[in-house]
Image (spheres, grey):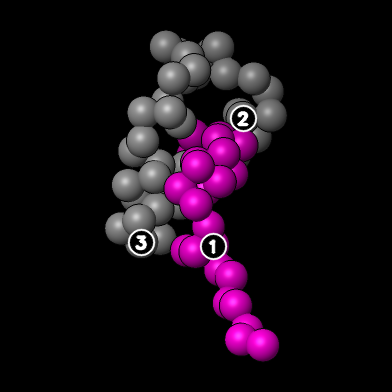
Amino acid sequence: LAQISVTILTLPVSVMLKTFSFLCIPEKIQMSRVCRLWKMLVEHSALWRCVPDTLQALPAYCLDCL
């Protein structure tokens, strides 16, 4: 049997986007600096649909990583 190597880079884009959706804004910014693929994923419009207009509207858990 052939071995199949699975890494984050072999995951479908939809799975990576779902994973990135759990990150708060500063974490997304950090992830965008890892590689070109992650930068492209972080810039995907699906991750920014629910971004509040101001930081005051952010949930408390997101303010922890600012």
Residue 41: image tag: none
Q: Residue 19 at x, y = what percent?
A: 59, 44
Left or right of 3, for residue 42? left
The amino acid marked with disc number 1 is: Ile
Q: Which residues are magenta?
A: 1-27
Quadrant housing the C terminus = top right
The residue labelled by disc 3 is 35
SS at mark 2 in the image: helix
Q: Of residues 11 and 47, which is closer to you in this image?
A: 11
SS at mark 3 in the image: loop
Q: Of residues 59 and 9, which is closer to you in this image?
A: 9
The residue at 35%/56% (across/down) is 37
The amino acid marked with disc number 3 is: Cys
The residue at 54%/62% (across/down) is 8
N-term-proximal mark, 2 vs 1: 1
The residue labelled by disc 2 is 62
Q: Nearer the viewer, mark 3 or mark 2?
A: 3
Residue contact at pointers 3 and 2, CB within 8 angstroms: no
Residue 25 sits above or below residue 35 on the image: above
The amino acid marked with disc number 2 is: Cys
N-term-proximal mark, 1 vs 3: 1
Left or right of 24, for residue 54? left
Q: Can I make out residue 23 in this image?
A: no
Residue 22 sits above or below residue 59 on the image: below
The residue labelled by disc 1 is 8
